[in-house]
Amino acid sequence: MSTHPSAQYQIRTSPHGLNLQLSGDWQFQSGIPNTDALLQQILNTHPETLSFDCQQLANWDSGLMTFLVKLVNSCNENNISTQLETLPTGIQKLLQLAFAVPERKGSRRAVLGQPVLAKIGNVTIEMHRNWSDLLAFVGELFFGFLNFLRGRARFRYSDLFFQIEAAGPSALLIITLISVLIGMILAFVGAVQLRMFGAEIFIANLVGLGMAREMGAMMTAIIMAGRTGAAYAAQLGTMQVNEEIDALKTMGISPIEFLVFPRLLALCLTMPLLCIYADFMGIIGGAIVSATMLDISFFQYFQQIQGFVPLKHFGIGIFKAGVFGVLVATAGCFRGLQCGRSASSVGFAATSAVVTSIVLIIVADAVITVLCQLIGI
Amino acid sequence: MTMTSHLDIRNLTMAYSDVIIQKNLNFTVSHGEVFVIMGGSGCGKSTLLRHLVGLMEPSSGDVFVDGVNLWRVPLEERNQIVSRNGVLYQGGALWSSMTLGENIALPLNEYSNLNQKQVQEVISYKLSLVGLAGFEDYYPSEISGGMRKRAGLARAMALDPDILFFDEPSAGLDPVSSRLLDELILELRDSLGATVVIVSHELASIFTVADNSIFLDPDEKTIIAAGPPKELLKTSVDPRVKQFLTRTI
């Protein structure tokens, strides 16, 4: 703890102007006096020169330096000459460094509020740019697909197998847990209602139909959006930050073919399979509730499903899963490639990949459901 | 344009949205020349490099590579042109899911007819050039930042490119490695006749390797000095160039 008094100043007149006497500890820790009044006092007097007397100055740190920088800047603006040579050598050197590189013209950003119309305009331009980027991305994806069909797509099959493993077998545990629970929830909800009519056996129809046609594909897609879509966005986003994507481009290798295509293909192949698995797990979940709550045996339950849930419903669910797979992979990879060059933009890319995927999944589900109604399946 | 010019930049203006970074840039890089792009931090050196390697389209102006306008040819042709370049990025930019060997093997497999045994031999040779012999099976995450950079250089040299672009090659390297890198750059020019374009503000390195240079200024937003750095040191009267080259304030 310093034994010196806290920061103090005093202004005296000198032959050519003012002399500022600084004394005591000028440190953040011991407190810096409010210097606005001092500045105003000096500027009002408008001396020819300002000199310093630091004989009584004890300890100092950036608290003193910020004050001096502000003071010297104000004096320069008001044509008051400052005699910096009257300051201690250390302070002089630090001030020299602080003023060595003048502020770059136009570098300071105006923090003026934007008019509402300008904000709307900027958002519209941003949306337009986003859509243009998405269309360009889908276009490149299409050409990549054509190259794949012609056997000219440039990607490593080892990457494809790795992505298939990451998107498929590695996701089984979470798919099992969620699907069994969804099946059980469907059965619980149905059981309460169906029991009132003595129609408990139809719980098998409810769970079978619900899982096969809708919930199996939907829940798998949402899990994969949160798990794999976000991972794709984060992986590609990090590659963008580390200039790995640039490195591919400057070798003339398309990141769409090399990075996006294996991921897209992996999800397209694994999603229908995961959907079948989720359907089966959901039905088992329903069977557990039926057996424990409604005294319906497994045999009765599966026989009921076999009799009243035709395979076409499973087919529709599997088709949906394939479509959702394309959407999740596209959204994840698109957001990843769109990522900026900072760590925070990787997080943003992952978040927006999940949001985009879920919105696309719901919209696509609605469209497919309406189309199925129209063609009567 | 002279017969020997490898890169010819004409009236190039670079911008991010509406913000102009540099404008009216005109310079040529001759075959087999070590050319340095100098300037203080934030003046747009790396952005200029991104334009030269085909990563960013100019706001206006042209980039000619061996007489071909890089941004006026179809994408496939542009990819062909840029695939003859080698680029060393600031952080190495190694593909993190691949080993160092696989990183170097990718361009070799894509653009050469070498069999796998020959590819392995090239990988060993390129890694030994940068002092990383025996590191073929390491992943980028398992080596230090300086080693990653050297491995990035080995990948950039994989196909013996016509032009090598270096973005801050010495940053993050110890003095000895930095000096070895300078030697390697000169050796690549002398033995392979490669053209080398370097973005740098490492004075020792600049004075050792550069045949020619330009100096970008962030306030004027254009080239304020051009010529061999040693000449600029003697003859330039611009205080900004002098300050930079003599490391004074």
Image (tube, grey):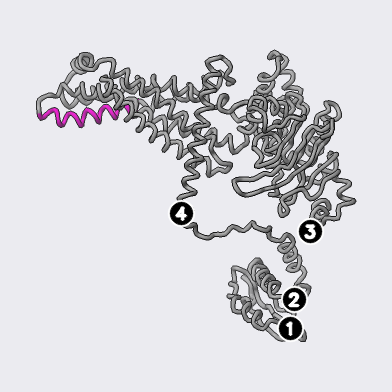
Residue at the spot of label 4: A117
Mark 4 secondary-structure assignment: helix
Q: Do the residues labelled 3 and 1 touch (CB within 8 Å)?
A: no
Residue A233 appears in the picture as rendered: no
Q: Earlier in the sequence, mark 1 or mark 4?
A: 1
Q: Residue at x 53, y 60 (%)?
A: A112
Crowd band around label 1 with a 10 angstrom C-alpha radius: few (<14), some (14–19), many (20+): some
Q: How far apart are marks 2 and 3 (CA)?
A: 22 Å
Mark 1 secondary-structure assignment: strand
Mark 3 secondary-structure assignment: loop
> Percent from the top left, x then y, of residue B55?
65, 35
Q: Distance between the residues labelled 1 and 2?
A: 9 Å
Q: Do the residues labelled 1 and 2 touch (CB within 8 Å)?
A: yes
Q: In this view, does B182 lie to the left or right of A56?
A: right
Q: Distance between the residues labelled 3 and 1?
A: 30 Å
Crowd band around label 4 with a 10 angstrom C-alpha radius: few (<14), some (14–19), many (20+): few
Residue at the spot of label 1: A17
Q: Is residue A362 above or below residue B220?
A: above
> Percent from the top left, x then y, of residue B205?
81, 42
